[in-house]
Image (cartoon, rainbow, N blue to C red):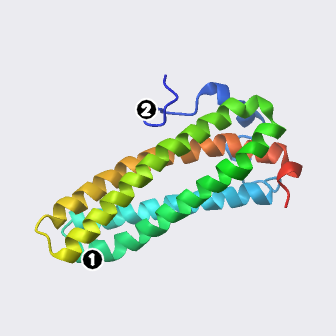
Amino acid sequence: MSDALDVRQALPEAHRWLLETYPRLRWHDAELGEVARFWLQMHGGFRQKQAAMAGQVAAWHAGGDLVSLHRGLIPTLQAYLQHLDGHHRVETGHYFPVMRRVEPRITAGIDLLDADHDAIHGQLEALFKAGLGFHQALASGAPDAADHAAHLADALERASRQTDRHLEDEEDIVIPLITRHADAFAH
């Protein structure tokens, strides 16, 4: 099984060892620290934006018009792209180095997550370009605006699939690690 994000079906077993001590069923316990809860809230926000955008695309596919799709989708897409890019920058620049230091055995797992960020960045670039193409086509009255919307919908589906996989895998590494080493992540 490949560890590449675009083909990975689950977090590789070698990176799941912290889940034995801190399984997902315990993540609602009082022992889940502030940073871990915040991390899960951030990820929940990304999932909500993805679901909102998928709903807007579905409404368009069900007979909605391009103007309504644009009005709902483009602002949500912009916020999603900015938020996810910023979140990844903080993780890669701040949290991941701390995690490598406090739990060296998980370094390969953190490296996997960092590689995911690179793959997702490519998806974010594709989403930005597709969103801009749709916006420009609709604003100029181009006859192929629906084609641009379809291209954006496809790019969104691909990006969401990879982002969902990454969010779940990251949580399976990060939440147990933050819980285990709460003092290193206390503010």
Q: Which residue is mark 1?
A: 68
Q: Position of residue 134 (x, y in %)?
A: 26, 65
Seen as rendered, the residue at the extreme left is 143
Q: Position of residue 98 (x, y in %)?
A: 78, 45
For residue 5, the mark is: none
Q: Is residue 185 left or right of residue 157?
A: right
Q: Amino acid at mark 2?
A: Val
Q: Position of residue 55 (x, y in %)?
A: 35, 64
Q: Earlier in the sequence, mark 1 or mark 2?
A: 2
| Residue 96 or residue 6, whichever sits in front | 96
For residue 7, the mark is: 2
Q: Residue at x 48, y 36 (%)?
A: 5
Q: Position of residue 87 (x, y in %)?
A: 61, 58
Seen as rendered, the residue at the extreme top is 1
Instruction: Identify whether 73 is placed above or below 128.
Output: below
**Is residue 16 shown to the viewer in this render?**
no
The answer for how far apart the CA atoms under marks 1 and 2 are is: 34 Å
Q: Residue at x 65, y 48 (%)?
A: 92
Q: Is residue 102 left or right of residue 149?
A: right
Seen as rendered, the residue at the extreme right is 183
SS for tag 2? Answer: loop
What is the crowding at mark 2: few (fewer than 14 residues within 10 Å), some, or many (at least 20)?
Answer: few
Instruction: Identify whether 123 is placed above or below 84.
Output: above
Q: Residue at x 10, y 68 (%)?
A: 143
